[in-house]
Image: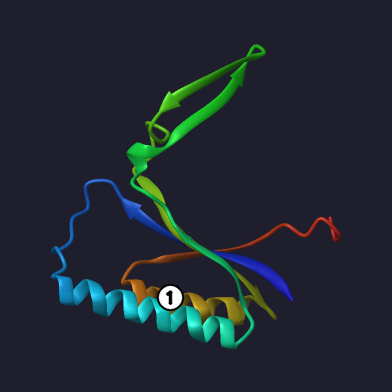
Amino acid sequence: MAQYLLSVHTVEGQTREPRTDDQTREFMLRVGELEAEMKASDVLVYSGRLTEPDAARVVRVEGGETLTTDGPFAEAKEHLGGFYIIDSADLDEALSWASKTSDCVEAPIEVRPFFDMRRG
């Protein structure tokens, strides 16, 4: 088994039609069903949704001094909106879960394996 990050990105300036309360409830129901399926399949390690990018802080150390700035990296147009960490037998299985996730959240999903320190 290998762990994969399935990440959901938002694009700055990209707008979508606002959801009604009923559409929001339906969306959350679908997400809940997806996560229940992942748990039943014993692949879900963790999932999370992030707040808006303007709540971010960037911390860097330059010349031994810690600098903290508000907001995401200024040059970034895409922002991480949420993610799933899954255990999958292989990349094909991870891509299958990414397909289900993309369909559920109506957004592209980036799939990236975690580096395995034991294998180098």
Residue at (53, 18) in percent of width and height: 67
Percent of width and height locating residue 25: 25, 76
Q: Is residue 76 something that shows in the picture?
A: yes
Query: Residue 57: where, in percent of width, then height?
Result: 45, 32
Instruction: Label 1, secondary structure: give it.
Output: helix
Where is 116 relative to 66, above or below? below
Colouring mode (rainbow / by chain / secondary structure / one colour): rainbow
The N terminus, quarter of image: bottom right
| Label 1: how many Cα within 10 Å (few below 14, some 14–19, many 20+) | many
Query: What is the three-letter code of the residue carrying label 1?
Result: Thr
Quadrant location of residue 116? bottom right
Q: Position of residue 33 (x, y in %)?
A: 42, 84
Q: In which quadrant is the C terminus drawn? A: bottom right
Q: Residue at x 34, y 71 (%)?
A: 105
Residue at 13%, 64% (x, y): give it: 17
| Residue labelled with disc 1 | 101
Seen in the image, is 120 located left or right of residue 108?
Answer: right
Q: Is residue 119 left or right of residue 94?
A: right
